Image (cartoon, rainbow, N blue to C red):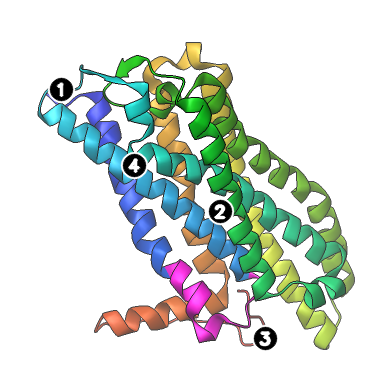
Amino acid sequence: MVSTMEIYMVLYIVIGCIVVTVNVPICCLIYFSKALRPSKELILIGGLCLADAVQSLADILAGGQRLVLYAHQQQDGMETSLRCFFQPFNILFFFGYHLVGIMSMLVSIDRMFAVFMPLKHRVMFSRRNGITMTIGALTFSALAFIVCLVLQTNFNVKMSILCFGSQAYLPMVWEYVHHIRLMPVLISIALYVPISWKLYRIVKTQKHAVGWKSENYKRLANFTKTVGFVSVGALILLVIPDLIVTYFKGFIGDYDKALFIVAHSKAILNIFIFTMRHGGLRKTCATFLRRLTPFRIVVHVKPIDGTR
């Protein structure tokens, strides 16, 4: 009989495969496609897609290894926390948690500058700056990993061979890793309160305006709304489940793994939001798919608005 844990692991793998299969090509298109070079606002979104892909790859590796252990009836075995820490999926989880939190916050900060100082933002923000910030997030994650690794070498206790990160990491390290994802995401959501207020005023002011400035404000408003939908998805699918697991674990029992799956399913929602609402990305993805499939793919993009 298939256990609940095995079902969870299968779901880990399914969700992970969907996200990695879609997000890796999207990242490549955002960073290397000539058609998307003018869409510099997508660079940080590419970083967020990369973060989701890293975390999802960890899901695939973790789910696969644990299913193998169940298949050989070794799921009740023991392992040392240090060996579990060095499992590839736990290393990827470390980087994934960092990148998801930091990139979510950077995207919201970028939108805040774009909404409150649109002219300065258009001049100052470039593809190079976006790539630099993404590399900075990766560098910070790597430095944090080195520091935690030094601390982790002094922590070596017996634990489940399934190697869950919450047990493999030093308690202080796990607390840090958990909060480095949760707190920046909370900040990114909080930033959307003033952003939404300002966006409402922009839309109200430009509602009946015409001309170059009006069209730019429409593009700004549409892309900012897109990121806003992502923030709402993060609140519902990531923040709330994380808070429940952290502060109400005694009430949910073994369902914490189910909430973990809900939190990671946010990446699938992000895929639909970005590809459905950004016309340039949608059109580029369709062109890419036409080269891989004989079927005809038709994409409708509003000519006056490059973000829908």
Q: Is residue 36 left or right of residue 69?
A: right
Task: State whether residue 254 is above or below residue 279.
Answer: above
Q: Quadrant of the N terminus?
A: top left
Ranked by sequence position, the earlier of labels 3 and 4 is 4
Q: Circles 3 and 4: CB distance less than 8 Å? A: no
Label 3 environment density (alpha carbons within 10 Å; few <14, some 14–19, many ≥20): few
Distance from disc 3 to disc 4, alpha carbons, whole Å, reads 46 Å
Task: Between label 1 and label 2, give the one nearer the viewer.
Answer: 2
Q: Which residues are magenta?
A: 26-41
Q: Which amino acid, mark 1?
A: Gln
Report which residue position mark 2 lands on. Answer: 138
Give me the disc on residue 88. 4
In the foreground, 297 or 257:
257
Q: Quadrant of residue 224?
A: bottom right
> Residue 78: where, in percent of width, then height?
24, 17
Ranked by sequence position, the earlier of labels 4 and 2 is 4
> Residue 255: where, in percent of width, then height?
40, 22
39 magenta-colored: yes
Report which residue position mark 1 lands on. Answer: 74
Distance from disc 1 to disc 4, alpha carbons, whole Å, reads 19 Å
Observer able to see residue 180 = yes
